[in-house]
Image: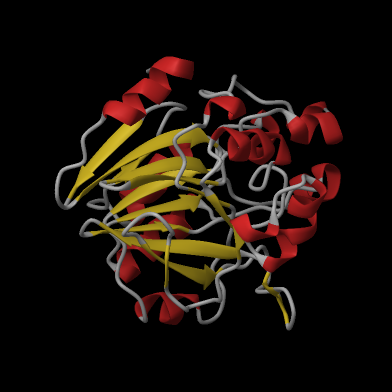
Amino acid sequence: MATGQALLDQMNRTPILPNSLAIWGLGQMGIAVKGPDGMVYIDAYLSDSVREQGSDDWKRAYPPPLQPQQVSNASAILSSHEHGDHLDIGTVAPASKASPDAKLIVTGWSLDMLADADIADDRILVPQAEQPMTIPGTGARLTALPSAHYQVEHDAQKGHRWVGYLIEWNGVVFYHSGDTIIYDGYEEMMRRHPTPDVAMVPVNGRDWYREAVMGAIGNLWGNEAAQLAANLGRGVVIVGHNDMFPKNVIPYASIADAFEQVAPRQPYRVLQPGELFYFVK
């Protein structure tokens, strides 16, 4: 798998056919999605800032496939919430300079962090939940959908704290859930919107010890991700959030067992950092 400049070159030269998207894993919940008229980065964590601001419990398991200053091809940089491995100023600030025309699409809870990083207000967009918008400079239609990390949190001024992004682009529906568990009304909310052809969800489980000792807020278990995909008729599931921090993961074998038992015909993928998944509908 390519890294660094070779990865960037691969991204830039990969052609996009009708009814397709090119998707690169960046680690954790980070991903880059290329359509026919642009490139979108979501929750890219390309630094070691969580460890630097916390402890060695949060040390990266591998180097980033790209350096933040190499992100020169972004049409938009998206963040699902303000936690450091999803809105990483160590990534966003250099990447926004390398891609000076890119808009930053974030929650209202993230605005203070971007202001501290001297990101100009006119580059920032805060979508309203379940209100579609077009990602500037592309033909991609984006809808922010509430997530729960662990609860659905909403503020009258800031809006929803945790969101996922449904992106309809080039005939393909892609969903990035951000960090979430299943909450009352989640399936009903998802059914109001197009069914994802590809859905990236966090599958690293949750337990008292990680919460109490590390301060980790967990996510879906394998059986939950599999049942959710089966219930909603999702296409390919990309398993995320289970590779970056060795003390905050579950065995991939347990995820494979869960999909085999709960939804044996459900396609799912695990993307290595820098790996390309080219999806054709």
Query: Which residue corresponds to the image point at 33% horizontal and 29% vertical from the top-left?
Result: 12
Q: How is the image coloured?
A: secondary structure
Q: 212 left or right of 122?
A: right
The front one of 158 and 184 is 158
Asked if residue 169 is positioned above or below residue 191 in the image, the reply reads above
Q: 225 left or right of 50?
A: left
| Residue 28 visible, this orientation | yes
Measured from the top left, where is residue 69 in percent x and y?
Answer: 60, 27
The front one of 28 and 247 is 28
Asked if residue 34 is positioned above or below residue 61 in the image, the reply reads below
Q: 25 left or right of 180?
A: left
Q: Quadrant of the N terminus?
A: top left
Measured from the top left, where is residue 73 in percent x and y?
Answer: 44, 35
| Residue 249 visible, this orientation | no
Number of marks = 0
Q: 112 left or right of 30?
A: right
Query: Which residue corresponds to the image point at 40% horizontal and 22% vertical from the top-left?
Result: 7
Measured from the top left, where is residue 219 in percent x and y?
Answer: 60, 54
The front one of 188 and 13 is 13
Measured from the top left, where is residue 23 in percent x and y?
Answer: 35, 40
Asked if residue 162 is positioned above or below residue 179 in the image, the reply reads below
Query: Which residue corresponds to the image point at 80% horizontal and 58% vertical from the top-left?
Result: 112
Q: Quadrant of residue 220?
A: bottom right
Query: Which residue corresponds to the image point at 47% horizontal and 62% vertical from the top-left?
Result: 165
